[in-house]
Amino acid sequence: MKAQAPIPDATTQRSAVTRSASAQPASGASSLTDSRPEAIAQLELADSVRNGPRMIAQRQQLRGMFGDIAPQSTGTSATVQRVAMVSAEAFANSKKQHDRDRKAMAFAVENGAETEPTDELSIRLRNSCEWILSGRLHLIALTRTADSEFRKKEKGENTYFPVLEAADEDVVHGQPKYYVNDVDNWANVFPFDDATQGGSSGNMIYVFNASENPQEIGRTLRHEVQHAADHHDEEVKTPLVTFKTEYRAHYYQGTFSESTEETVEKKGYTWNKRQWAVVSQIMKNYTEILEAWNRNEGGFREKVVAYVNPDTEAINKYNSARIENFYLSVAQVKPDKLDYPYRLKKFKEEIQV
Ligand SMILES: [Zn+2]
């Protein structure tokens, strides 16, 4: 099996020395015994490498791939440098792919911000792009690593780079961040469930493999910016709050065009077709919402069915940075002394004294 062939490197050279040291009795009686401190140190090092968690993990990994490996008398010579699993060319290609993904996202945002809108969808896209360019949210292009299949055996999910940091950095417009061609090195890579096109985390929006589906970038931007624009995170997080923000984001992203006039009967309720298309998609992708539907605490189902037109609870349905500024300004206004509820509250406080 080729994969077991040791790569001549510092590790195997060390093991050659330790073999000659360990072949001798420890008593020091033989003139051939290598009892030099450096030889003993090397022996100990080889043992600790052989029995360290990394080597144990590697042996388990290899067993999974190739079946049991014949016992090796030479200890560390069984080491397989897993770095060799991916060719230098494949690694270089993944970096090029990442550059293409970043460019595709940067192009989509810059182009979208300059496009003269003609309908609701293009207004929302233009606004979402302006939102990004204002620095309120940062963009991350996530690219699959060349060794993703190999790492998947360990983690069960595809591997992407770069990692999502609590970034005040826009990775799409900033410097590219690559990873190391070594499957044991998890710096700047992470396993990720890529069932969706993208998502958001904190103040970041990420898109998987953006250059492969450039037409999807706009959808992701419309969707994810709405989650920020609706200020749903100012409410206590409940399944209903999560459902409503997802309903808006899905409805506005530009995927659903079913009729709102025709109705369907599903799950014992009457929905309009587009409403049901959105709701069923959400239930498929968000376990917590499906579970809340099944539990039906506090009349959850009725509330879901009643939220037909997303605009009725959207404070910023076009993802406008200008509306956002207005919202933030209004939020800072203190109650005026002429404000009736304020005066009434004060009055009641005073008469209690
Ligand atoms: Zn969402």
Image (spheres, rainbow, N blue to C red):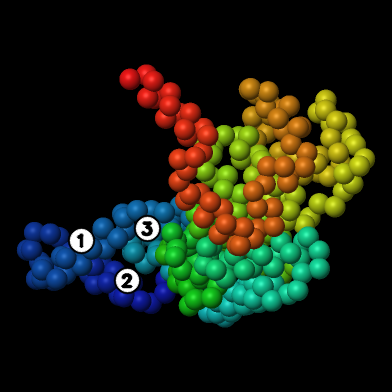
Of the image marks 3 and 2, the number of the one nearer the N terminus:
2
Residue 196 in view here: no
Above/below status of 54 relative to 230: below
Q: Nearer the viewer, residue 243 or 7?
A: 243
Kind of element beneath mark 3: helix
* Residue for badge 1: 44
Q: Is mark 3 within 8 Å of ligand 1?
A: no
Q: Nearer the viewer, residue 129 or 185?
A: 129
Q: Residue furthest right?
A: 262
Image-quadrant location for residue 28: bottom left
Residue 24 image position (x, y, % from top left): 17, 64
| Left or right: residue 144 compared with residue 72 | right
Of the image marks 3 and 1, the number of the one nearer the N terminus:
1
Above/below status of 353 relative to 235: above
Instruction: Residue type at mark 3: give it.
Output: Met
Kind of element beneath mark 1: helix
Image-quadrant location for residue 90: bottom right
Above/below status of 302 relative to 88: above
Residue 103 image position (x, y, % from top left): 62, 77
Q: CA distance from mark 3 to mark 1?
A: 15 Å
Q: CA distance from mark 2 to mark 1?
A: 13 Å
Q: Residue at x 58, y 78 (%)?
A: 99
* Residue for badge 3: 55
Q: Residue at x 51, y 55 (%)?
A: 329
* Residue for badge 2: 11
Instruction: Residue type at mark 1: give it.
Output: Glu
Q: Residue at x 92, y 40 (%)?
A: 262
